[in-house]
Image: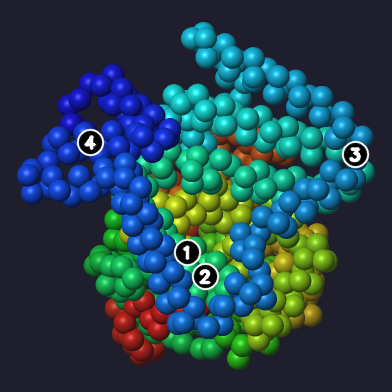
Amino acid sequence: MAKNSKPSEKKASKGKKSNKSATSAASTCVNAAEKSEKTTPADAGKYEKDERIFQDFDSLTEYLTEVSGRSQDIISKFFNRSPDVSDFAKGNKSADPLNIGNAYQEMVKGFSADPGTVVQRQFVLWGEYARLMANMQKRITGETVKPAAAPTSDDKRFRHPAWDENPMLDFTKQSYLVLAKWLEETMESIEGLDEHEKAKAIFYTKQFIDACSPTNVPILNPEVVEATIESKGENLLKGLNNFLEDVDRGDGNIAIRQADLEFFELGKNIATTPGKVVFRNDLIELIQYAPVTDEVAETPLLIIPPWINKFYILDLQPQNSFIKWATEQGRTVFVISWVNPGPELKEKTFEDYIAEGLFEALDAVKAATGAPKADTIGYCIGGTMLSTALALMAKRGDDRINSATFFTAQADFEEAGDLLLFVDDEQLDSIEKQMDAAGGVLEGRSMATTFNMLRSNDLIWSFVIDNYMKGKDPARFDLLFWNSDATRMPKKVHLFYLREFYQYNRLAEGEMVMGGETLDLSKVNIPIYMQAGETDHIAPHNSVYRTAKLYASGDNQNVTYMLAGSGHIAGVINHPDKKKYHHSTYSGLPDSIAEWKAKAKKHPGSWWPHWLNWINKQSSGTTAARIPGDGELPVLCDAPGTYVRVKS
């Protein structure tokens, strides 16, 4: 569309296209005829053939036969190269790779607990549908009416104009939204379930609702219909091939590609900040990054990323790399790169990860720089481990950590959000069986699927539509590539994490015992900076606030809580040059997060400069820039190292 088109012209043009796409095959003939009028003589024969496909029975039969043959060829090649996956077609493997059946069962189980409420609520549903039918009758007569149901402002599924302009699609959309609202409200009003079971039923009801969206039905989705018409069905063939490739890659389970897995290459166009691996053991490689300033802070900075994903979330591209930015601020930056463990490491424990991961990294930082202490950053589960280690170090009088910063990390899991729904005894027993079957590790895609379910429309169904219905190539998007690069976890480490933190919340309760010590976060008395994200669905900001309060419950007067705009990733990775989002600050820690928000001041842009100002106050003094390999530790290889390259 022309850059200088008027808005009204754009809207009219877009609406016309959507109506053609969402009605009938006759529209296709018109569309093809319009194209033929604008073609050169060399193209004329091509478009005549396209028109004839839909006007002549013999041509249509020939076309469908060709499509059918190519489809069979795709499927045949898939099963020939993947004989084990034939179990999927025979029913020996799950025929429900997107978990729709389980979601439906959980929803029905919830409704069966209180059938009386369900029956009463049905009258509400009938009333809503009666109102919808009356509205549609008025619309047919040309009257303008207010919709009986409308998507929320952040719902991207129904943004195509055809969902409003085409009466059939509008009715389908509103019917779905009416039912979706009724299902959610009915489940919330159910009585007879304990709190955990009810929360689980509500969660799975939402999963079922998302799965049943009309946007997930190819013939109803105007974007899919447009793609099918424009490509003469090529999108469906390509989508089928994409689907079979993903099932093949997932060994019979669907492993949805969120990004182009072939485009990015570590050290070439992602994770490119210069540095060297200077230490390695069974669990970690320690990377020391090259300085870019003549002088650096005397206290080095050690970053502990989560081992659920790869460390390079902090070093995606030069323009959004926290690691690169930190070196530019005069910091000697070290980052732990966790191993992607196989069955040989199944006996490793959470305490091993602290001892061989964090504590040996601290020793290595001292050997590389000569500095007796380090400032630390813990991200997500890396921050949970850092909190546990700090409590243990406080008991032992270990003062090697000068300050601790936490990126969306929890130590109090009382309000840890929807992930709490996955940690009852039944589900933990199931996870343990999965890990035993995999040789004592949790496969990376299992945890990734759990996280994706928390935002299923954005992280599951949007890719089902794009990859399998539209036949689109996966995006070349660094963040989505990283999100697909999941890691495995040893059985003992993961079960300890789920049971001790999520299920029993022992660290926050002062009941966790490690190394013979009962841990108490109130005894930690070093500077603490806690970053949280407003829309974080993995480490909710209220949960992170509870963690800040834990640290401040003793004598520690240097605990800072900061609330950033956006969520678990974008709330952290927000380079100041981007001038995106906002952050809120307040120096006190009142009783509730609501009080804190009421008193906090909102600032535009990234929170990184606010943290830099804070960290500079905790570690004064400078020294000459440190070059990797100049200390007691030799260079082992270039960053990003070898452990990060191991795929699950």
Q: Return the mark for residue 18.
A: none
Q: Nearer the viewer, residue 122 or 563?
A: 122
**Mark 1, other Cα within 10 Å: few <14 / some 14–19 / many ≥20:** many
User: Alpha-carbon distance for marks 1 and 3?
Assistant: 39 Å
Label 4: state its secondary structure.
helix
Q: Give the tally of numbered discs.
A: 4
**Mark 4, other Cα within 10 Å: few <14 / some 14–19 / many ≥20:** some
Residue tagged 2: 247
Q: Point out the frontmost of discs 3 and 4.
A: 4
Three-letter residue code for mark 3? Pro
User: Alpha-carbon distance for marks 4 and 1?
Assistant: 33 Å
Answer yes or no: do the residues labelled 2 and 1 have beta carbons within 8 Å?
Answer: yes
Residue tagged 3: 115
Q: Point out the frontmost of discs 1 and 3.
A: 1
Answer yes or no: do the residues labelled 1 and 3 have beta carbons within 8 Å?
Answer: no
> Residue 644 in the image: x percent, y percent?
43, 77
> Residue 328 in the image: x percent, y percent?
29, 60
Give me the residue at 90% from left, 39% from top: 115
Residue tagged 4: 33
Residue tagged 1: 243
Q: Quadrant of the N terminus?
A: top left
> Residue 20 in the image: x percent, y percent?
36, 32
Residue sitting at the far front: 58
Res 48 quadrant in image? top left
User: Alpha-carbon distance for marks 3 and 2?
Assistant: 39 Å
Give me the residue at 68% from left, 17% from top: 131
On the question of residue 490 being in view, the answer is: no
Three-letter residue code for mark 1? Phe
Three-letter residue code for mark 2? Val
